[in-house]
Amino acid sequence: MPDTHIITKLRANMISYADKTALKEKTADGWQDISWKEFSKQVDLVSKALLHKQVKIQENIGIFANNCPQWTIADIGTMQLRAVPVPIYPTNTPGQTAYIINDAGIKILFVGAQEQFNAAALIFDQCDSLELIVCLTNDIDINNHPKAMLWNAFLASGELSDNAELMQRVDNAQLDDILTIIYTSGTTGNPKGVLIDYANISSQIDAHKYNLPLSDKDVSLCFLPLSHVFERAWTFIVLFKGATNCYLPDTNLIKDALSEIKPTVMCAVPRFYEKIYSTIFDKVSKAPLTKKVMFTWAVNMGAKVATAKQQGKKVNWFISKQYALADKLVLRKMRDILGGNINFMPCGGAKLDPGIGRFFHAIGINVKLGYGMTETSATVSCWDDANFDPDSVGKIMPTAEIKIGENNEILVRGPMVMRGYYNNPEETAKNFDEEGFLKTGDAGHLENGNLYITDRIKELMKTSGGKYIAPQHIEGTLGKDHFIEQIVVIADTKKFVSALIVPCYETLEEYSKELNIKYHDRMELIKHSHIVEMFEKRISELQKELAKFEQVKKFTLLGKSFSMDDGEMTPTQKLRRKVINSRYKNEIDSMYDDKK
């Protein structure tokens, strides 16, 4: 087996770090440790249990579960057998799950909780390739399903397999083996299975050693879905380095988990930072003048020190002393929101507002914004510690090659780029140019080694006046307001830009109490003249920097959030605009009714 193969390294770690904690699991009784020795034992039992079920080399095995240590144990156990794990979002509907099982020809499906088991049992007869459902816990009611097993029973079946056959597969593994098939949660049409091999992941692990100083002393909080390439690739890096990975199955518990685990590193998406940012500024806006002044002064001191570090300069004695005081009085308290021990935080999934990025660096949180996609095994560019521009999505990774194509489309080539789409040669051919560059669908430009995203080509809108609108830019500008939870821009073929807005009801209801506004329900609240006027003023202020033709002229407040259950969001929280436009057609038409 090649030395750079991730399974080689993980098996070495299982010996070197035998008694050290590899994984932590959040349970009702607190956090439970799993040592590298126990991790090794369970991974091998998974591999041998799959062997007992006669799983072949490069055969597809599904994982349909929330984050938990067993997710990774099943993942690595499948990988070291040279079979192919296929993650499925735990929030997928039974129909979406059946599509992936059938398209990938999945033979065995690991499920996490009762909800996933029930969905799998419901569609079992619709999936010809599916032979067995394996529960990742022992407390699921399998209702005497003849083709289902609980976790302990499945592991016990691994004792029946010969270890020699497993070791033969481990020794014969190749970097061009397919490591995984990840189905993209496209905003239109059926998802496509992205083929990622071991060479793709090896190249990413190697490239990240330059800008992500991770060690076996680090502790990572794993709360983004492992079914997405971002958290999964990060987990590979964490385990490769011998660090500890802590699994949080319920994101509603993130606040407590941060104070309990006190992670040194963790992945997060821009929305996570936006919520913290808006919460802090909401509290500051209500604070006495003296506290507001102190907050502004402290953040300014932090910004000066952060800028100096990025430029490789030293601050003078006076600034240094002021910063030490600012850190003691203000900045340290804000870092404590994230547990107080953060060294750096990878950020991906969307573009982070530059102002929010600057703020976190000013308070001493080293956010590492990156750009990438499932088709590039995650990262293509990443904020560097030196001379990065918050308006960019970072410096190009050492192994990535970028060129700007037609319509300013960003094209990528390199060892991190996928092999293609599973069983879909037409889509594969369509997404590569004649020189082998992957078409990202994002428009942007390169400057001084940094990559800048300007818009999403596939989602550009054109008003009836012929103006092109990049909805994500407008949504990002307005969406950072703490009164706005979700926003969808409407502009295509319309005479002006409008928006559907879901308020942050927790903040809005608190605001209404302060004004003593009486209401029976949310619909009555959002129709109140004071509330509408407040949103009008805030939106007007927020979009001053936008061009006139980009500014939202009218908006409608909605009483219900956009959700994946209603088909309005993808599992990665991207908007399904066609579904939203259809569902809210009356509200949209009303904003363009000249009689109103």
Image: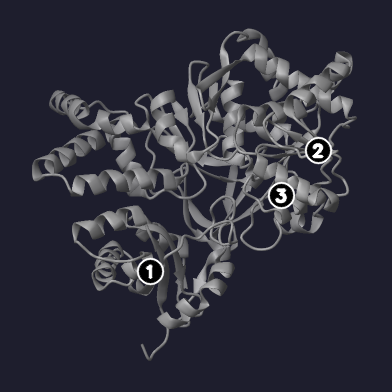
Is the residue under label 2 in contact with that under label 1 (CB below 8 Å)? no
Q: Residue furthest bottom?
A: 595
Please state which of residues 527 and 164 is positioned toward the viewer in this rendering: 527
Residue 92 % position (x, y): 65, 51
- The residue depicted at 43 percent of the width and 62 percent of the height is 487
Distance of mark 1 from mark 2, alpha carbons?
Answer: 46 Å
For marks 1 and 3, give the one nearer the viewer: 1
Q: Which residue is mark 3?
A: 436
Q: Which residue is mark 2?
A: 144
The correct choice, above or below, for 110 with respect to 102 in the image is above
Q: Residues within 10 Å of mark 2 (few under 14, many from 20)?
A: few
User: Label 2 amino acid?
Assistant: Asn
Circles 2 and 3, Cβ within 8 Å, touching? The answer is no
Q: Separation of disc 2 and disc 3 at Cα?
A: 51 Å
Apparent side of residue 450 relative to residue 553 in the rendered image (left or right) = right
Residue 380 pos. (x, y %)? 56, 42
Image quadrant assignment for residue 294: top left
Q: Earlier in the sequence, mark 1 or mark 3?
A: 3
Quarter of the rendering containing residue 199: top right
The Cα atoms of the two marked residues, 1 and 3, are separated by 52 Å
The image's mark for residue 205 is none
Residue 477 drawn at (x, y percent): 36, 59
If you read the primary sequence from the N terminus, does the residue marked by circle 1 or circle 2 appear first?
2
The residue positioned 88% from the left and 14% from the top of the image is 164
Q: Amino acid at mark 3?
A: Gly
Q: Mark 1 against mark 2, which lies toward the viewer? A: 2
